[in-house]
Image (tube, grey):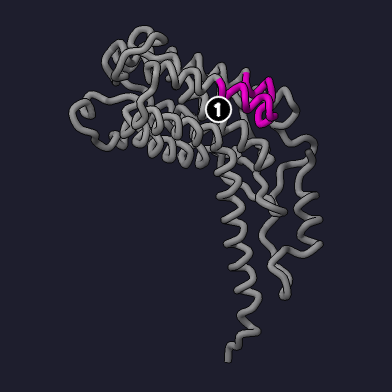
Amino acid sequence: MTTWRDLAPSRSRFVFGCLQFLRFGLLELVSCLFPAFLFAGLAISKYVDLPIARYDALLIYCLTLTLLFWVVRLETWREVAVIFGFHLVGLGLELFKVRIGSWQYPGDAVTKFGGVPLFAGFMYAAVGSYICQAWRRFDLRVSGYRPIATTILAVLIYANFFTHHWIPDLRIPIALTLLWFLRRTWVFFSVGVRRYRMPLALSFVLIGFFLWIAENFGTFLDAWNYPDQVSVWRLVHPAKFGAWALLVSMSFVLVASAKALEGRLYHRGTPATVVKPLRPHRNTMMPTTAEVQASSECEAP
């Protein structure tokens, strides 16, 4: 007959798992500070009368946020430089897409060129900020990463966003090739005292999905509009989810290049490992001393 005492270890594991999930969510939330502040600015600027044009105010707001993050050391100067690179890459794509009518930015502004407000680049920079923050807070490491091949594919992904308007869309062949090169690539991350891993390609898909959700909020707040959203708001087409997942791979390449310079990208010497979940102590919700030591020794810095 099963007793409560027999179920205690299982319950302890369940509670510890719930606590780990909450810790994970908290770390994700803190890593999304810049995107969260950006969406707060979008919401406020939509419903509050401003003394200057909305897009001009958003540009000043985003520049101030970037400076503030650097001053309080939420981001390093190298990470700010990477985020600025995201801004330029995003603006280049925006100028082209708006020109051919893929989407539009309603309203006028002094800082609007070619139909694109300069603040628009910060929406891409927010992705870079998230990856930089998550890399530090989760103590990310990557094994089996092939930087040259992944960088070439990232460039092809970016180029395809332009060229598919004149030649066949190659995103599916490029995506399949990327999956092939990433088939043995793992990303390792820490939550509390535990070390976990997941396929790097899966992380691209998950981030892309949440970016698609964020895009729906952005269009709902009239930051920009697709042609079918001009008269009435509609859900962004699910195909954009795949585009965001591919765009995340480009973002990762930029951040990984900076992290490689910091010596934070590759495992050195021994193969990457991950601690398997062990049974917590019967009388506590926290892992045992042996688990903590195993977790700290699972990977060399």
Say which residue appears at 64% left-offset and 50% top-offset.
196
Magenta residues: mostly which secondary structure?
A: helix
Asked if one can make out residue 42 in the rendered structure from this viewpoint, the answer is yes
Any magenta on residue 70?
yes
Q: Is residue 47 above or below residue 3?
A: above
Q: Position of residue 216 (x, y in %)?
A: 34, 36
Image quarter where the N terminus lies is bottom right
Say which residue appears at 47% left-offset and 18% top-offset.
59
In this rendering, position of residue 144 left or right of residue 240: right
Judge by depth and name the residue closer to the eye, 43 or 86.
43
Say which residue appears at 50% left-offset and 18% top-offset.
60
Magenta region = 64-80
Query: Which residue position holds label 1?
Result: 128
Q: Position of residue 147 (x, y in %)?
A: 62, 25
Q: Residue furthest bottom?
A: 1
Asked if one can make out residue 160 in the rendered structure from this viewpoint, the answer is no
Q: Which amino acid does the dot numbered 1 rest on? A: Gly
Image quarter where the C terminus lies is top right
Q: Residues within 10 Å of mark 1 (few under 14, many from 20)?
A: many
Asked which quadrant contains residue 233, the reply is top left
Judge by depth and name the residue closer to the eye, 216 or 172.
216
Q: Position of residue 268 (x, y in %)?
A: 77, 35
